[in-house]
Image (spheres, rainbow, N blue to C red):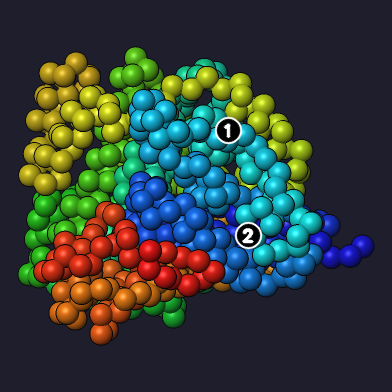
Amino acid sequence: MAEEYAIAMDIGTSGIRAQAIDVSDNSTISTTVTLRHPIPGANVMDHLHFAVNVGVDQAHHLLIEAVNKVVDQLGIDKSKVVRFAVCGNPIQLSLFQNIEIRDLAFWGTNAMERLKITPPKRNSQILKPGDVDLEINPDAEVYIPPAIKHEIGADALAMLVKSDVVNREGIYLVSDFGTNAEIALVIDGEIYSCSAAAGPAMEGQAIECGMLASPGAISDVSPEGMDWQLKILNGDLKVEDGDIMDVVEGTVKKERETNTKARGITGTGVISAYSLGTEQGIISIPDIKSPNNKLNLQDGVFLSEKDLTEIGKALGAFRAAHITLCVEAGIEFDDIDAVYMAGASGFYVDPLKSLTVGQIPANSWDIYQIGNTSLLMARDIVENPELLQELQEIADGMQGNHITLATSEIFEKIYGLELAVCEQNMPLWKYDEWLESYGYGNLPELEEDPEIHRLYDSDIPDMGKNGLSIIEEVGTKLENKVEGCVNCKKCENECPEKALVIEDGVATIRSDYCNGSACLRCERVCPDKVFLYEKLFYIQGGEATQL
């Protein structure tokens, strides 16, 4: 039998993960991940904003160029790919397909009618590679899993299906702990859902030394007296011991026995540091009690007070979302039977620390870490294409109650309390008083001895015989002349991600480093107001030309 391959892909808000699979025996050949997303922005709403204001075609071009780069990196004969499945949230899959996306911008019915926006049906589909500019065998089948409804995408369906909570009686809380955190409360099969948009800090971004879960990332810390044992991901994304550090003084107490050097810290590592630092009294949000006001980790990696404020806001979004779902569903935290943690961040984080910092309800007693369910479901589809129709039937049968947190008065009140905690050091007893005054109950008490079930060794269980490869530069360099630019370089110096270079009035932006509409500091600092981000570039055929 001739060689035939399949590709399973997860397009997340913070990056792309893909696997090549041998169709003959469903064995994994290789795995490729990117460290960033190719479209400018720090969260999914930034990607949506870019697509709506700069152009869906441009956003699609950036995304597909990155997808094709990932496919190349898998190291297989692309002409022999016969199946390709992709999973992600509705915005990512709409950009992948290059279909209408404005209906996801939360505009009202009147605005949609005035703008003549017809929401597309986001049902399961089988496309051809040419339909989406995918550079593989033109006769291959491209599988798109369904959304439950336009707010609840295939990634949310994946975590619900892979956790199997929709088929059981009981009350379950399922969360995908990524940048655009999908959260579902399932009560005897009925789903209450929301997207917390916790922000890039959950994936290690918007953190000065932050990075996604990849080799060299500090993913956890544990106490050694008052010193810290650092945990680092090795080349196979397995956790190994790093240095033992005095994080206050920044001195090494015991060097690591391996050669893995720390390159940065993941969101899970930040959560772990946040928890341990608070427990040891080194952290009193928003302050760090060290000579340089930093937590000094190994190999020059550190956490600043600004970093901890960012992670505090992200954690606050989770706790506020959990409380909002419980209030909307009319249940108490004590009613929840089990908690499921999906995604890389949900897999690598220590659940005991998640309990103490509010990432999951403090009283959670039965906790499951289930890995990258989005990639796992994409893999299930290429291994059994008939599953696509089954998923559509599951999606059609689900009763969903989606809460849009941006317009929720309950969430607005609670998140205001969270900001007071992480920015003004409001004590939790005061938070609890306010919560009770709103009629939202009380914060749960901490579970001291929960049962923790970790289903795999890493969030991607099998890297394949050729192992893992990483693409660090996944974006496109967009270049164009800025008319009227005097070359003062204020825009370049203001860019927090060093994504922008300007020479002789010509701007070059690296799309995967740019924070997009979440930032726009380059535009605001321009003294002559000639740097107009959204109108600067038009992408066609891999080049950037002015509108």
Report the side of 143 relative to 222 (left or right).
Answer: right
> Mark 1 and mark 2: span between their CA atoms?
21 Å
Q: Residue at x 37, y 60 (%)?
A: 40
Q: Where on the picture, by quarter, is residue 401?
A: top left
**Residue toward you, 313 or 429:** 313
Report the side of 172 relative to 418 (left or right).
Answer: right
Q: Residue at x 34, y 22 (%)?
A: 326
Q: Residue at x 23, y 24 (%)?
A: 409
Report the side of 514 relative to 138 (left or right).
Answer: left
Three-letter code for the amino acid on which mark 2 is drawn: Asp
Q: Where on the picture, by quarter, is residue 445?
A: top left
Query: Dot 2, crowdedness within 10 Å: few (<14), some or many (≥20)?
Result: some
**Is residue 89 in sight in this rendering?**
no
Q: At which x and y percent is residue 469?
A: 56, 71
Three-letter code for the amino acid on which mark 1 is drawn: Lys
Q: At which x and y percent is residue 70?
A: 58, 66
**Residue toward you, 79 or 267:** 79
Report the residue marked by disc 1.
121
Residue 546 vs 147, above or below: the answer is below
Label for residue 392?
Answer: none
Query: Dot 1, crowdedness within 10 Å: few (<14), some or many (≥20)?
Result: few
* Badge 1 element: loop
Report the residue marked by disc 2.
133
Residue 472 vs 119, above or below: the answer is below
